[in-house]
Image (cartoon, helix red, strand yellow):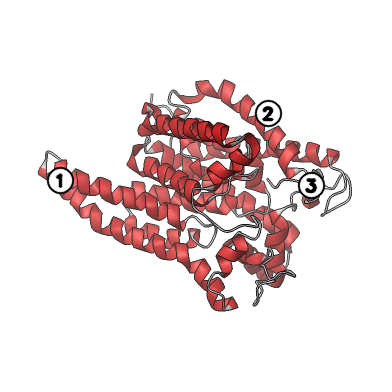
Amino acid sequence: MRSVVGSQGTWVVQVLVVFVVGRLVSTGLLLLSAARQGPSPWSGPAPGYGVFINYWDSGWYERIFREGYPAELPRGALGSVEPNQWAFYPLFPGLVRGLDAVTGLGWGVLAPSVALAASAGASLVIYRLFRLRAGHGSALAGVALVSFAPVAAILQVPYAESLLLLLLASALYLVSTHHYYAAMPVVVLMGLARPVGVPFALAVGLLVLHAVWRARTAGGSAERHRATWQVLPLFLLGVVSSLAAITWPAVAWITTGERDAYVATETAWREEALVPFVPWFATPAALLGPVAAGLLVFALLLAVAGLFLAPAVRSLGPVLWSWCAGYLLYLAAFWDPQSSTWRILLPLFPLALAAVPRGPRQLWVLVPVSVVLQLLWVDWFWGWTPSGPDGDFPP
């Protein structure tokens, strides 16, 4: 008798059950942290759930929802650009604003609802993406790791992460199934949700090189023809990704009249100029000294190299492998290591599949560890505790 496990319709229910349980766990952790929360810049002590999830960047997205973007960059007394809305991409608050125009339900209802709906859709697409490389059990286990991840609470707060996850998983699925032209509008939307156009273009560039290599080395004519056919649409997808990457900075430039409006706003939080790669050495050097920092960076490079050479990661296939490699290269070049780094690693979700090559058995260890780490992340990073003249570290 044919098993119905993983059959059409059944897998949808299973994925959504995993997703709902994950969100219930995250809700419990958020409520626990909210009960322990003292006075903060956003509320008094022990805020309700709806207030608590609107902390940090949620407030910036709500400001965009209500006010839009400034026509002039705000500047301090010394003329430097101050933090403002231009650092935050428009798709998430714009979608909530459009729904509010139709329903009138407001930010407090619609913003977390959009985040939840997007992350639920992302779970379904991630399952289908993982099924391209693994069986039902491993794919469902991979979805579980994403749903219970140490930063999984971000999937139900008014941030753009859940919307990005849906669009990114969809784009990777379309590329994996060779629907390159269908992936293009998804990539454009993705470039308006979060700044991932550059790493996606890097990943597509790696895929172009891979297709060229296969076209030259494939033994059979059919394989050579298939690889050659993929080069042009992949190249065009790379062009679209590159254009998507500069769209939002170009909008900021046109609106404010300042060419570096987006970059100047992004670096306003750093209070220093953007210098590629250097922060990954400078930050630990300031804490540990140059020798220890050099050893730490070297060990990190070895760990990343070992990860990408591991059989489980290579088994993800060229599309998922290239995305993870391109995204890590992008973070190495442009990201300033800080407390938000854990959240920024969420787009590396394909590695969840590599963590469960033998199916759900590993979940008995991985899920409890993830829940404990999520408790720490919610309590230490999402919850606000004054830690100095500038307040707390952001999640």
Q: Earlier in the sequence, mark 2 or mark 3?
A: 3
Which image quarter: residue 88? Answer: bottom right
Report x, y in % for residue 195. 52, 57
Which is closer to the viewer, label 2 or label 3? Answer: 2
Q: Secondary structure at mark 3?
A: helix
Q: Secondary structure at mark 1?
A: helix
Which image quarter: residue 301? Answer: top left
Quick check: can you spot residue 126? yes
Report x, y in % for residue 17. 59, 36
- Whether tag 3 and tag 1 are in contact, CB under 8 A, the answer is no
Residue at 80% x, 36% y is 32
The residue carrying mark 2 is 372
Disc number for residue 284: none
Q: Earlier in the sequence, mark 3 or mark 1?
A: 3
Report x, y in % for residue 339. 65, 43
The residue carrying mark 3 is 49
Quick check: can you spot residue 14? no
The residue carrying mark 1 is 216
All told, the count of numbered labels is 3
Residue at 29% x, 58% y is 235
Q: Earlier in the sequence, mark 1 or mark 2?
A: 1
Task: In this rendered view, identify the residue nearer to me: 59 or 168.
Answer: 59
Q: What is the crowding at mark 3: few (fewer than 14 residues within 10 Å), some, or many (at least 20)?
A: some
Q: Secondary structure at mark 2?
A: helix
Amino acid under disc 3:
Tyr
Which image quarter: residue 91? Answer: bottom right
Left or right of residue 83: residue 45: right
Left or right of residue 344: residue 104: right
Q: What is the crowding at mark 1: few (fewer than 14 residues within 10 Å), some, or many (at least 20)?
A: few
